[in-house]
Image (cartoon, grey):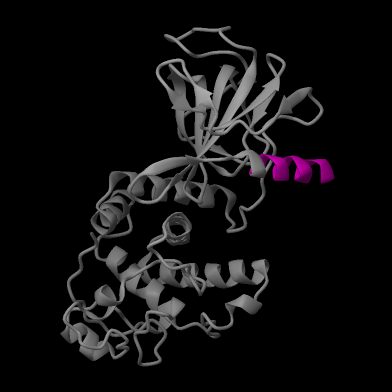
Amino acid sequence: MKTFKPIFFLLPLLFILPLHFSAENTDDLSPEEIYHERMALYLKAETMTQIPWYYYAAVDSYERGLRRARKDLPEEEGLIAIYYTPEEWVGAQNPDLDDTNPTSIAMFGGIGLDGNGDGKADITDDEDVLYTFSQHMDKYGAKEEDIKIALWDYYQRDKAVELVTGHAKVYKEFNTLDLSDRSFPVPLRYNYSYRSTWGDGRGWGGRRIHEGTDIFADHGTPVKSTTYGIVELKGWNKYGGWRVGIRDINNVYHYYAHLSSFEKNMERGTIVEPGTVIGYVGSSGYGKPGTQGKFPPHLHYGMYRDNGLIEWSFDPYPRLRAWEKQDRKK
């Protein structure tokens, strides 16, 4: 659970934006305009706290992923997805859950702050929300270890810290918020075939369901990253053989299994983009390290969503079809 103590400050003028985009008018913005306005907010927070913008982008994308994964969190209406409950924002004992008065909010122990100098601490105002979060981070410092401590204190979850810091590394590497491109995991010029196999029964190692899509291809066919992300795992899994796991900025884990070998210099922590070769199709798995040939060569591709508490698989087949179509157009 997130816990906060009331904080009192004067609003620094550096956080005031020349234009204000509220939840009511972001629907009229193009994706490019949304990226531009978000970046303006992140850069203002960086100027205020000396914490690099990509950490704010990482937290925002992490929380946007949580909103997509959980039914108990509302969909964001504005530019910033960082979520506070009304009770957190205005104070648990505050009789007015719609309170926007910074003085009364502070009196009741709420954390909401005025981030744009309009005299209100509005939970629906992007600037107020990001400013409030930035002040939590600023209490700890701008060094990498300080940032990790601040994140752990905020989320109370090691996995959340790992995901946010991973997202930050991806944003830093590509220096842009537009990381929406995707790629089919094998080159279209190679021979391959696949169908929907998610949920099919599997017997080796105990009764279980198939948590992915099998793409059958010749041994040694290159396997590509479908997304921007960071290599979270690499090595042997008794079910998946030689495998690579990549985490994207939406908190989704992409699982590439049964490889024959890895691409050179592909290690845990490597930053990848759509089309980066990560390994090669094989038939490894279903046994101790090195076991090969218990089934025809193929890539097992799985997707797992993290909701801040647990992680679960979902069917990647519709996305694979869409990415295949996009690659053909390219």
Q: Is residue 285 rendered to the left or right of residue 94?
A: right
Q: Percent from the top left, x then y, of residue 228?
A: 58, 44
Residue interval drawn in magenta: 319-330
Number of marks in the rendered image: 0
Q: Percent from the top left, x then y, of residue 185?
A: 67, 33
Where residue 124 sits, quadrant-wise, is: bottom left
The residue nearer to you, when weighing 99 against 46, is 99
Where residue 263 sits, quadrant-wise, is: top right
Q: Residue at x 58, y 21 (%)?
A: 264
Q: Residue at x 67, y 39 (%)?
A: 320
Q: Percent from the top left, x then y, of residue 27?
A: 61, 76
Q: Percent from the top left, x then y, of residue 213?
A: 60, 31
Does the magenta run of residues contain 325? Answer: yes
Whether residue 323 is situated above or below residue 250 in the rendered picture? above
Q: Is residue 220 visible from the viewing direction of this image? A: yes
The residue nearer to you, when weighing 42 against 191, is 191
Whether residue 300 is situated above or below residue 287 in the rendered picture? below
Q: Is residue 37 rendered to the left or right of residue 145?
A: right
Q: Residue at x 35, y 44 (%)?
A: 310
Q: Quadrant of the C terminus?
A: top right
Q: Residue at x 36, y 67 (%)?
A: 49
Where residue 48 sits, quadrant-wise, is: bottom left
The residue nearer to you, when weighing 172 against 325, is 325
Q: Quadrant of the N terminus?
A: bottom left
Does the magenta run of residues contain 10? Answer: no
Whether residue 258 is situated above or below residue 322 in the rendered picture? above
Q: Is residue 279 visible from the viewing direction of this image? A: no
Q: Taken as a whole, is the magenta stretch helix, strand or loop? A: helix
